[in-house]
Image (cartoon, grey):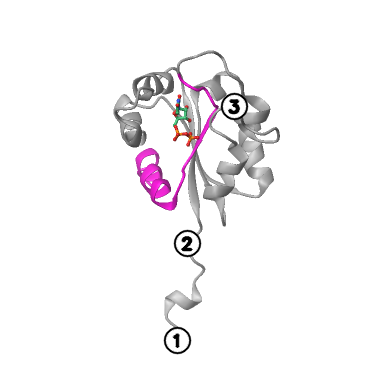
C-alpha cells in the first residue's frame, strides 16, 4: 500500500470571497457569483449574513490603526454581506485577478471592480468584493466566516 500522501488528491485550494454591502445593495451578488463560476471555480459554501462588529474587526485586524479602519468596519456593517468559499487550483490569486485593483477607478475593465464599480466620493473605497490575499489569510478568514467548515 502506498502512503495516503501519494494516492490522495491534495486538498483543493480555497479562498474567502465577500460580496460587500455595496454589492448586495446594488443587486450584484448574482453577477459576481456568475463570474466566479464562469471562471471555473466551485462554490463550496455561501451565506448571507449581518456580520457582528467583532467578526469584522478580526477579519480586518491587519488594518487596525490605519485611518480607514473605523470607516471600513462601519461600511461593512451598513448592510448584509454575502460570504462565499470558492474552490479550485489557483483560486486565491485567480479571484484577486477577477476582482481587479482595490480602487475601482484604477481597476481594469473586465474585472469586477473595473466593470461594476466606481468612485462614489465616500471616505471608504466601496469596491464590491473582498478576496483573501494568501493561503494563510484564506484559512484564517474561512475559519472566521465559516467556523463549521
Ligand atoms: N480601503 C480604503 N482605503 C484605502 C485602502 C483600503 O477604503 O486606502 C478599504 C477598501 O475597501 C479595501 C479594504 O479597505 O478593499 C481592504 O484593503 P486592502 O488593502 O486589503 O485591499 P483589497 O485586498 O480589498 O484590495
User: Where does the magenta region start and end?
Assistant: 124-149
Residue 30 in sight here: no
Q: Nearer the viewer, residue 39 or 47?
A: 39
Counting residues from the start of the chain, the first of labels 3 and 2 encountered is: 2
Q: CA distance from mark 2 to mark 1?
A: 21 Å
> Which residue shows up at 54% across the image and 26% down it?
127
User: Could you tell me which quadrant the N terminus lies in?
Assistant: bottom left
Decide: few, some or many residues near mark 3? Use Cα within 10 Å; few <14, some 14-19, many ≥20.
many
Check residue 104 in the rendering and tell me which mark sits there, or answer none: 3
With 55 as the anchor, is 6 left or right in this view?
A: right
Whether ligand 1 has any atom under 8 Å from the Cβ at mark 1 is answered as no
Residue at label 1?
Answer: 1
Counting residues from the start of the chain, the first of labels 3 and 1 encountered is: 1
Residue at label 2?
Answer: 11
Query: Mark 2, mark 1: which one is toward the viewer?
Result: 2
> Which residue shows up at 43% across the image and 19% down it?
75
Q: CA distance from mark 3 to mark 2?
A: 33 Å
With 87 as the anchor, is 71 left or right in this view?
A: left
Task: Tell me: residue 136, above or below residue 58.
Answer: below
Residue 69 on the magenta segment: no
Counting residues from the start of the chain, the first of labels 2 and 1 encountered is: 1
Residue 131 in sight here: yes
Task: Tell me: residue 56, above or below residue 40.
Answer: above
With 145 as the anchor, is 102 left or right in this view?
A: right
Decide: few, some or many residues near mark 2? Use Cα within 10 Å; few <14, some 14-19, many ≥20.
few
| SS of the residue under disc 1 | loop
Amino acid at each position: 500500500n502506498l502512503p495516503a500522501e501519494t494516492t490522495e488528491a491534495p486538498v483543493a485550494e480555497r479562498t474567502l470571497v465577500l460580496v460587500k454591502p455595496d454589492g448586495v445593495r446594488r443587486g450584484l451578488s448574482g453577477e459576481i457569483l456568475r463570474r466566479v463560476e464562469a471562471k471555473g471555480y466551485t462554490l463550496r459554501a455561501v451565506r448571507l449574513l449581518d456580520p457582528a462588529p467583532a467578526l469584522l474587526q478580526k477579519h480586518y485586524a491587519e488594518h487596525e490603526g490605519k485611518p480607514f479602519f473605523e470607516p471600513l468596519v462601519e461600511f461593512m456593517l451598513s448592510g448584509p454581506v454575502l460570504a462565499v468559499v470558492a474552490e479550485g487550483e489557483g483560486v486565491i490569486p485567480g479571484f484577486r485577478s477577477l476582482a481587479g485593483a482595490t480602487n475601482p477607478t484604477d481597476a481594469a475593465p473586465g474585472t469586477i471592480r473595473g466593470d461594476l464599480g466606481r468612485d462614489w466620493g465616500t471616505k471608504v473605497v466601496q469596491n464590491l468584493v473582498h478576496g483573501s490575499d494568501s493561503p494563510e489569510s484564506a484559512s484564517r478568514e474561512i475559519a472566521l466566516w465559516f467556523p463549521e467548515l
